[in-house]
């Protein structure tokens, strides 16, 4: 009986501890930059920018669209395009399995959302890359979706905005993923011939084949503060050139200083900045 009573007494206490742990877990987090404790809610209310040091946390593709489109409204295109795994690639696990897991985790078929809507009252097309989907990597689907988006821009005579967040080409699609660099770049040259503006927004991180193709081909290339932007990683470069790289190498600020970027724009000012840039290129909204 005594055992029973003790158990009974112990149980609710345990349950309360459990409940309080569940309730408080994840409410706070440590900032990756200043290491201070930040309230998650305060972070979310501040466009995922650290209220203490202005570090820009990574945000997903949908949050990005919500931030840029007027009234958070847009029409999505080519949502159902999915990779066919042309090489039947297997590394630690099969590419098919990896794709399946990613679809489940992100509710997306591939690493980009392609959509049209209004930005400051002007119709635009935005392609927003999803870093969580195999590192925002560029395979045949991303290449096709972005190319179709560009073709739509030419057809409808509307500006293009691509928000990059990517580790580069998708290894699991081998040379096919590399071909997307040329495919998108040549589509962009048709956009240029049609004299329509393309605003490239580089966010943390934009690397590899994405930097080496469309992310650096904007009529204006802008980045968020502190974003990692480059082609190869710093370790590979150091090993190749056998030199120590300078402080802050491959961060937005360094790139701006060395002429690779046109501007660094803080997240809360991004929409206004793009709106103004488009007014400069296309004239005021009619
Ligand atoms: Zn911070």
Image (tube, grey):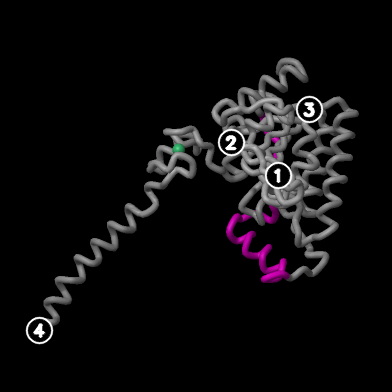
Q: Is residue 123 visible?
A: no
Question: Can you tell which quarter of the image residue 223 is in?
Answer: top right
Q: Is residue 176 visible?
A: yes
State the mark number for residue 1. 4
Q: What's the distance in space between the residues labelled 3 and 1, CA to CA?
A: 33 Å
Q: Is mark 1 within 8 Å of ligand 1?
A: no
Residue 161: percent from left, percent from top: 72, 33
Q: Nearer the viewer, mark 3 or mark 2?
A: 2
Q: What's the distance in space between the residues labelled 4 and 3, CA to CA?
A: 80 Å
**Is 92 covered by the magenta stretch?**
yes
Ranked by sequence position, the earlier of labels 3 and 1 is 3
Identify the residue position indicated by label 1 in the image. Answer: 243
Identify the residue position indicated by label 3 in the image. Answer: 219
Residue positioned 78% across, 65% down in the render: 85
Secondary structure of the residue carrying numbered label 2 = loop
State the mark number for residue 226. 2
Secondary structure of the residue carrying numbered label 1 = loop
Q: What's the distance in space between the residues labelled 1 and 4, CA to CA?
A: 75 Å
The local crowd at label 1, few if under 14, some if 14 to 19, many if 20 or more residues have their Cα within 10 Å, is few
Residue 249: percent from left, percent from top: 65, 38
Q: Nearer the viewer, mark 3 or mark 1?
A: 1
Which image quarter is the N terminus in?
A: bottom left
């Amino acid at each position: 009986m005594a055992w029973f009573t003790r158990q009974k007494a112990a149980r609710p206490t345990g349950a309360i501890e459990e409940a309080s742990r569940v309730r408080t877990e994840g409410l706070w987090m440590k900032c990756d930059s200043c290491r201070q404790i930040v309230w998650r809610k305060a972070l979310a209310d501040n466009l995922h920018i650290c209220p203490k040091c202005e570090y820009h946390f990574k945000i997903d593709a949908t949050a990005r669209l919500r931030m840029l489109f007027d009234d958070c409204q847009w029409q999505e295109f080519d949502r159902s395009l999915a990779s066919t795994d042309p090489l039947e690639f297997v590394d630690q696990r099969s590419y098919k399995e990896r794709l399946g897991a990613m679809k489940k985790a992100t509710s997306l078929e591939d690493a980009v959302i392609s959509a049209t809507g209004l930005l400051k009252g002007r119709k635009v097309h935005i392609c927003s890359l999803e870093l969580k989907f195999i590192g925002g990597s560029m395979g045949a689907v991303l290449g096709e979706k972005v190319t179709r988006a560009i073709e739509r821009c030419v057809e409808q005579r509307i500006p293009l905005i691509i928000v990059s967040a990517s580790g580069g080409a998708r290894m699991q699609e081998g040379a096919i993923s590399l071909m997307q660099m040329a495919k998108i770049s040549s589509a962009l040259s048709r956009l240029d011939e049609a004299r329509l503006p393309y605003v490239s927004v580089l966010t943390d991180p934009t690397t590899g084949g994405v930097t080496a193709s469309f992310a650096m081909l904007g009529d204006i290339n802008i980045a968020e503060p502190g974003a990692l932007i480059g082609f190869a990683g710093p370790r590979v470069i150091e090993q190749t050139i056998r030199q120590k790289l300078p402080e802050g190498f491959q961060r937005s600020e360094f790139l701006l200083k060395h002429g690779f970027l046109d501007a660094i724009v803080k997240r809360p000012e991004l929409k206004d900045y793009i709106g103004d840039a488009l007014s400069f290129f296309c004239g005021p909204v009619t």
